[in-house]
Image (tube, helix red, strand yellow):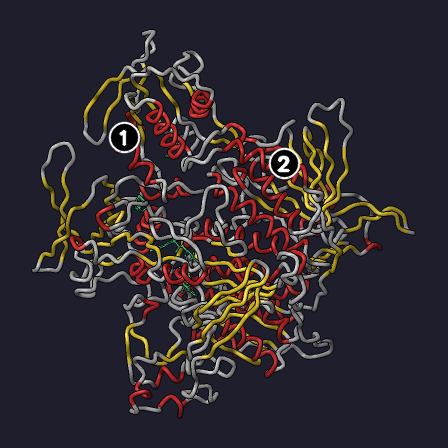
Amino acid sequence: MAEAGRHPNIRVLANTDIETVEGEAGNFTVTVTRRPRYVNEDLCVGCRTCSTYCPQTLPNVFDENLSAAKAIDILCTQSIPAVAAVNREACLYFQNKCTICLGVCKAKAIDFSQKRKKGVMHVGAIIVSPGYEVFDAKIAGAYGYGRLKNVMNSLEFERVLSASGPSKGEVLRRSDGKIPSKIAWLQCVGSRDARVGHSYCSGICCTYAIKQMILVKHHYPSIEVSIFHNDIRSFGKGFEDFYNRARQMQGARFIRKRISSIKENKRNNNLIVTYTSDGCHTIEEEEFDMAVLSVGMSPSKANGALAGILGLELNHHGFCHTDSFSPGEIAGRPGIFAAATFTGPMDIPDSISSASGAGAAAAQLLSSRRGTLTLPKAYPIARFIEGEEPRIGVFVCHCGTNIAGVADVSSLLAHASALKDVVHCEDQVVSCASDSLQKITKAIKEKRLNRVVISACSPKDHEEAFREALRESGLNPYLLDIANIREQCTWVHYGSKDEANQKAKEIISMSVARARNLCPIEDIKLPINKNGLVIGGGLAGMKAALSLARQGFKVYLVEKNEELGGQLAMLHYTLDGMPVKPFLKNLIAEIKSNNNIEVFRGYELKSFAGYVGNFKSTLAGVNNAKAASVELEHGIVIVATGGQLLKPAEYRYGESQKVVTQQELEQMIASNSLPGDLKQVAIIQCVGARNEKRKYCSRICCGEALKNALKIKELNENTDVVVFYRDLRAYGFREDYYLQARDKGVLFIQYEPENKPEIDLQRESLSLSFYDSILNMKGELNPDLLILSTPIIPEGNQELSQLLRVSLTGDGFFMEAHMKLRPLDTATDGIFLCGMAHYPKYIPETINQADGAALRAATILSQNSITASGAVCWIAEDKCISCGACISVCRYGAIEFCETPHGKKAGINPVLCKGDGLCNSTCPTGAISLRHFVDEGITAQIDSAFEA
Amino acid sequence: MKDGAGSPVGAVLVVGGGISGVQASLDLASSGFKVYLVEKAPMIGGKMAQLDKTFPTLDCSL
Ligand SMILES: Cc1cc2nc3c(=O)[nH]c(=O)nc-3n(C[C@H](O)[C@H](O)[C@H](O)COP(=O)(O)OP(=O)(O)OC[C@H]3O[C@@H](n4cnc5c(N)ncnc54)[C@H](O)[C@@H]3O)c2cc1C
Ligand code: SF4
Ligand code: SF4
C-alpha cells in the first residue's frame, strides 16, 4: 500500500470524483473534480497537532463509527496520503466559530481557501476497481442491528479486533464494556437471501467468520464461540485447513441452523437468538452476550452513476457485467476494464489476481506506448561515509499494541539512547507507515546518521521498505539493522511483560553492536533477456502466453501433450451456459497465428538453470527418441501446468458402467449418449476430497455438479436428480444456479463424512443407502446412474518443483510467494504461477490469474536491467584450497570452480547466491565471508549479549 | 486506437484505490505506464485497510 504512495509513476488523487469520460480505447479524456481537503498535501507533515486541538468531535468512519475523530484529522495511522483532511460538515470554521487549527499548525498547511478543482487527464485505458459495500444489516431487521447494543456487523468487529481499533484490540460489549463470555456469529446476513434482494453468496464471510473466531479464541481462550451457518463455504487455497483448525478449538461450535431472530434480555442486554430445529418444527432459543452479523458484500450504491459515466452495464445483482471467458472485459467498451469486487464478491487474493489481470489487458492495449510517460525512480547520490565515526539512529515501533502492549517503549528509548554511538532515538506508532518512513529519511538527513536500527517486526516483513527509506536519504541501504522485538519478543512473551521488556532491550543492544560494524554494499546490475517461457498449454498457459505476446514479448509455450487445451478440452459448456469448444478453437488459432509465440508441443522441461532475467532451459521431447532437445534463454517463467481430475477408487467406479465421474457424464451429454429414459440420477460430492488423505476442497466440483444436474433436467425434466453434498459451495453468483436447480426439483441431501452414502456391492443394480444429517433420517435409492464429483489433483508438480526449485504446498500445488498479497509470484524471483497449478479454479478465475501472471512477468521483462542484492558471499582466492566443500553444500548452485592463475578455485556467482552462509560455515580454511554478516559484526553482537 | 485517431496514450486511469486498484496501479506503473489512481475517499486502502488480520495467513492486513 505504502509503495503506491511512493511510486514515481503513480499519481494518487484522493478526495477525487470522476465526472466525465470521453473518447475511445487508446485515447480517453477524463475530467475529475478534486474536493478540497482544506489541507495542503505538500506542506502537511502528518503530526496531527491540529486534531489534538480541534474542539469538534465526530464519529470516525474508518473505525466504523466506533471511535471518535476530530473535524480535522487523519483517520488511521497508516493513511496514504498521511495528511490531515477537514470534514466540512462538522468543521466550525465554516460556521464562523473557530480558527484554532490555523494557529497551531506549524507547517502552515491548513488552507480554508481551497476550492473544488477540476482536472483533465488523457489516458489510453481505464481500470474500474471501485470495490463493494458491506450489506446494511438494518434491512434484515429481525437481527436487531442498530437497535440492540451488543449486535455488531462483522466489519465493526474487524475494527474491534484490531490493535489500532477503537478498543485497542480488546473485545468489549457495547452495553457495559465487559468482556463477553459467549459470542455468536450469524452467517449469510444479506447474502443468499432473496428477501433482502441479495440471492448470491458473498463467498468471503464463512472464512472471515472462522478467522474472527480463531482470533477471539487466541486472545481470550475462555470465550465460547458459536457460528450459526448454512453451508460452510471455505473453498479457497488453505481455507479448509483453516476451517478444520477452528472446528478443533475447545469451546467452538459449528451449528448448521439459520437464526430467525434476535431479541434482547432487558435485564443484562444479553441476546436471545431463536432458531427452528430442523426435522421437528420446534423453536429453540439460546442466550449469548454478543452477536456478530456476517454481512455480505453489496454492490456499491454509486455503481449505477459510475456505470452511467463509463457507459457500462451492471448485471441483475448490481455488479459490473462480465462473462466467464473475458472476466475483465466489458462488452461494448473496449479500453475500459473491470477488476475485483466490482465484478462480483471475492476475497483479497482473488481481487489481486483480477486486478493484475485487468491491468494486463490495459498493458496489451497500450504496449506500443510503454515507457513513453514514465520516469525511473531517482535517488540522491549515496553519501560517502568512510572515515566517519558511527552515528546510529534507533527507531522503536509500537506496532499498535503488538509491541507497546507488552514492552514499555519509553524505557526502550531510554535504554537505546544511552548506548554508545547512538545519536538519535525516536518512537513511532507504526514504523512501516509512509509518514514514519519519511520521518526516518528526514532524521537520517538532519542528524547525519550513518547507521540505522529499526526495532520492530521481522526483517521478512518490511526490511525492503526500511532500506528504501535509507536510499531516499542518500544512505547506502545496507547500513540498516533490524532488531526484531515483535516476533522474537513481545509476541512470544506476552505473558511475562518484565522479562519481555528486558529481552527487548538486549535485542536492541545487540542490534546496535552489529550496526556499528555494517559497511556499505553495492547491488549488482544485470541485463535482462526479454523472452518468456510458459510451461503448460492449457487455458492458463495459453492465456498467459497470449497476454505476454500482446504486451510485446517473445514467448516460448511448452506443452507435454501433442495438443493444446489441457482440461479445457474435456469441457463442453460452462455453468453460465457458454459453449467451450468454439472458445477453445479460437484460442488455439490465436496462439498459432501470433508471431511472438513459439509453441513446443510434445515437449517438457528437462533442465533449468540461471536466475531472474537470465534463465536457461532445455526442453526434451516427451516421446524422447524422435525429437531433438531445444535450448532456450529467457528472462521469466510462468508455471501453468494445471491439474488432473482424480479417478475415484470408491463406489464401484470402474467396475460398473453406471458409475461415472462428472467429466465422463459431461462427455456423455455432449455426445448424446446419455440414455433418454433415466428415471433417477444420484450425484455424490467430495468423493476423494476433504478427507484425511486429501484435505483440501477442490473448489469447482460443486459448480460442476450444479451445471450437469441442470443439464440432465434440461434433457428430461422427469429424471429425478439427487445430490449428496457436505457443504454446497456455490459461491458468488453460482448461487443463482443452485436456486435454479432447486426450483427444477433437484433434491439436495446433506451428509457428514462419518456417514457417507454407501453403495451396495451385492446386487447388480445400484443401491445407495444414505443418512440425511439435516433431517436425521436414513434412506435408500436405486439410481440408474451414479455420478461422482472428484477433485482436481496436482500432477507432475513434484518433478517440476525440483527442477525450478519452487516449493509445493502440503496438498501438492505450487506455493505462491504470499498466500494473500502475492498470489501470482513464487518465492523465486522471475518465476510466476497461474491456473490450477496454483489451486483448482473456474475458467474466469484461471483467466484472471493467467493475464495477471503475464503482467507480473512484464514488470520484469519491461526493465532494461535488473538489480540483484549485493549482500552475498565472497571468496578470498588465496585461502581457497579447492576442496569443493562449499560447492556441495550450496543449495542454489551458486559456486563453481573457475580457472585462475593459481589453479582451480571456487568462485561465486553473486546473482545465484542468496547469502545464506552455508558455504561460509563449511569452508575449512575460512576463505568465505558473507558481505552483510561479517565476523566482526556477529562477534560484537554476541559480546553485547553476554555483557548484559 | 484506430488509424487516424492518433497514437494511444501510455497512461492508465485507475478508478478506486482499494487493494485491487493499488495492485493494478503498481503492476502497470512498474511495467512502464503512467498511472492516475483516483480515490473518492481522503485515503487509499479501501476495505482491506480496515481489516484486522486476514485469512488464511492471519498476518496483518497492510
Ligand atoms: C468483515 C470483513 C472481513 C474480511 N476479511 C477478509 C480476510 O480475512 N481475507 C480476505 O482475503 N478478504 C477479506 N475480506 C474481503 C476483502 O475486504 C475484499 O476482498 C477486498 O478488500 C476487496 O478489495 P477491493 O479493492 O475490490 O474493494 P474496496 O476495498 O471496496 O476498495 C474500493 C475503493 O474504491 C473507492 N471508490 C469507490 N468508488 C469510487 C469512485 N467512483 N471513484 C473513486 N474511488 C472510488 C473506495 O473508496 C475504496 O477505497 C473481508 C471483508 C469483510 C467485509
Ligand atoms: S455461505 Fe456464502 S454468503 Fe453465506 S456466510 Fe458463507 S460465504 Fe457468506
Ligand atoms: S464437492 Fe468439491 S467444491 Fe464442493 S465442497 Fe466438495 S471438494 Fe469442495
- Amino acid carrying mark 1 in the image: Lys
Most extreme residue toward the left is A267
Q: Report if residue A459 is visible in the image.
A: no
Residue A589 - label? 2
Is residue A650 found left or right of A440 in the rendered image?
A: left
Q: Residues within 10 Å of mark 1 (few under 14, many from 20)?
A: some
Is residue A793 found left or right of A192 in the rendered image?
A: right
Q: Report if residue A140 is visible in the image.
A: yes
Residue B59 in the image, given as x and y percentages of width and height:
44, 55
Residue A606 - label? none
Q: Nearer the viewer, residue A115 or A558?
A: A115
Q: Nearer the viewer, residue A756 or A670?
A: A670
Residue A744 - label? 1
**Relative height, residue A3 to residue A872 (above, below):** below
Most extreme residue toward the right is A901
Residue A233 in the image, given as x and y percentages of width and height:
34, 41
Q: Identify the image quadrant of residue A714.
A: top left
Label 1's element? loop
Q: Residues within 10 Å of mark 2 (few under 14, many from 20)?
A: few
What residue do we see at 62% from left, 78% from top? Answer: A449
Label 2's element? helix
What residue do we see at 63% from left, 56% from top? Answer: B2
Chain bearing tag 2 is: A
